Amino acid sequence: GSRQLFADAGRRAAVAPGELSDADIDALRTQVLTLLQDKASLRQAIAPFLSEAKYEDYEPQGDELTADEIREALASGALLRRDPASRCLYTLRDGQPDALFINGQEIDFPPALAGFVKLLADHRRLEAAALSAWTGHEEAMEWLAEQLALGYWFLDSAE
């Protein structure tokens, strides 16, 4: 991951350990240029940063709902909305999402839910009709329940 992005192997012990020397900058530039050539590594390195929350120390508030409660709410006209302060993006492999990042964190999802993840990440709000292909999918509803508990999405009762 991005933690091992910049190694300083070969960096000699500095007389002034706090100094970022020209040699350090040159070594870093070489590593960055190598990274820029490798799309997969670059994607893994930048996605967490690009999905950082808009506000520092932001913690969304979640709702504990069961899959059935989610279905009932949608059936009675509730909208599924993305938390407006959260940032969400995914990376693709073979045209399908293979990684999801929300507020700088990678969020795991079963590969079978790639289409569901894309639908959620591409929209700020979704009506029941847009979700109808997934409401009967138990794994999708269980995963959505986890996301609602984390506060990344919420159900908004019909106005």
Image: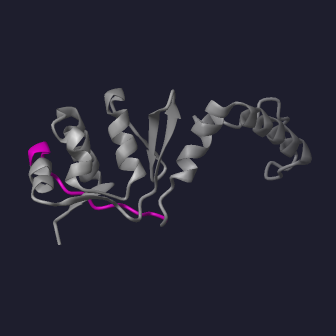
Tell me: residue 124, above or below residue 27.
below
Quadrant for the C terminus in the image: bottom left
Viewer-closest of 87 and 133: 133
Q: In percent of the image, x 75 and y 32: which residue is there?
A: 37
Query: Residue 61 in magenta?
Result: yes
Q: Quick check: 32 left or right of 55?
A: right
Where on the picture, by quarter, is residue 35?
top right
Viewer-closest of 128 and 138: 128
Tell me: residue 7, above or below residue 17.
above
Viewer-closest of 143 and 13: 143
Viewer-closest of 16 and 99: 99
Q: In percent of the image, x 58 and y 37: which residue is there?
A: 44
Q: Residue 79 location, x and y as percent?
A: 23, 60
The boundaries of the magenta stretch are 56-68
Q: Quick check: 86 left or right of 18?
A: left
Q: Residue 146 location, x and y as percent?
A: 25, 45
Q: Residue furthest bottom?
A: 159
Q: In percent of the image, x 21 and y 33: which residue is there?
A: 139
What secondary structure do most residues of the magenta stretch adopt?
loop
Q: Residue 66 location, x and y as percent?
A: 12, 46
Q: Residue 7 location, x and y as percent?
A: 72, 34
Quadrant for the N terminus in the image: top right
Tell me: residue 48, above or below residue 110.
below
Query: Residue 113 in magenta?
Result: no
Q: Quick check: 132 left or right of 25?
A: left
Q: Quick check: 120 left or right of 130?
A: right
Q: In percent of the image, x 62 and y 31: which residue is there?
A: 40
